[in-house]
Image: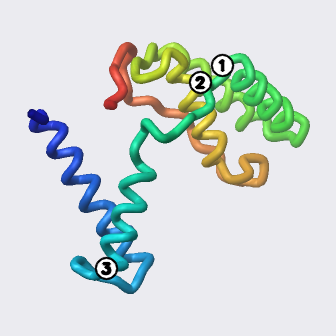
Amino acid sequence: MASQHAVAVYRRQQELLHQLITHLLPVQRGEENYDTAMDFCAGNLNPKYHRYKDVNPKEVRELYTVLSNRMEQHSQLSKASHLRQMCRRLSSLGLKGNSDDMDAALLLLLFGLANKPLQQGKVLTPQFNMEPNHAVPE
């Protein structure tokens, strides 16, 4: 028997897939192409078919060291300082989740989402509202 949480997650996943499919494709529920698209998307979300690369914390640290050094070379001293500070703060939170290296995984994700950080003009003041040892939802 599935837990209430698992059922709620499944329903939410189905609703999000419905929104994605109807946004991208000119189909509605009940149509053959909708069912095919739904089966394809749901099948690709199944984690047992994915082989994710493990995060190497040393490589992530080196990546951020290189980035902060490049910021300094480009006279972006404030950004480099804030970046180092945020990396230290994130590492000190002691995040727990599916991975032992959750902080490295999050830093790698943020790096991928950064969209050319050297070309961003705005410098944000780092802020964390999380307390140490908070678990990351699975």
Spatial CA distance of label 1 from label 3 is 45 Å
Asked if residue 46 lies left or right of residue 7, the reply is right
> Can you tell which mark lies on residue 32?
3
Relative to 45, residue 39 above or below: below
Q: Residue at x 90, y 36 (%)?
A: 73
Percent coordinates x, y for residue 2 in the rendering: 13, 35
Given contact means CB atoms under 8 Å apart, are the residues at marks 3 and 2 in contact? no
> Can you tell which mark lies on residue 57?
1
Percent coordinates x, y for residue 46 in the rendering: 39, 44
Spatial CA distance of label 3 from label 2 is 42 Å
> Can you tell which mark lies on residue 104?
2
Q: Could you tell me which secondary element the residue under label 1 belongs to?
A: helix
Q: Could you tell me which secondary element the residue under label 3 belongs to?
A: helix
Asked if residue 80 lies left or right of residue 99, the reply is right
Question: Which amino acid type is shown beneath numbered disc 2?
Answer: Ala
Q: Quadrant of residue 39?
A: bottom left
Given contact means CB atoms under 8 Å apart, are the residues at marks 2 and 1 in contact? yes
Q: Quadrant of residue 80?
A: top right
Question: Which amino acid type is shown beneath numbered disc 3?
Answer: Glu
Q: Nearer the viewer, mark 3 or mark 2?
A: 3
Q: Residue at x 79, y 34 (%)?
A: 67
Between residues 112 and 1, which one lies in front from this camera angle?
1
Q: Could you tell me which secondary element the residue under label 2 belongs to?
A: helix
Between residues 68 and 106, which one lies in front from this camera angle?
106
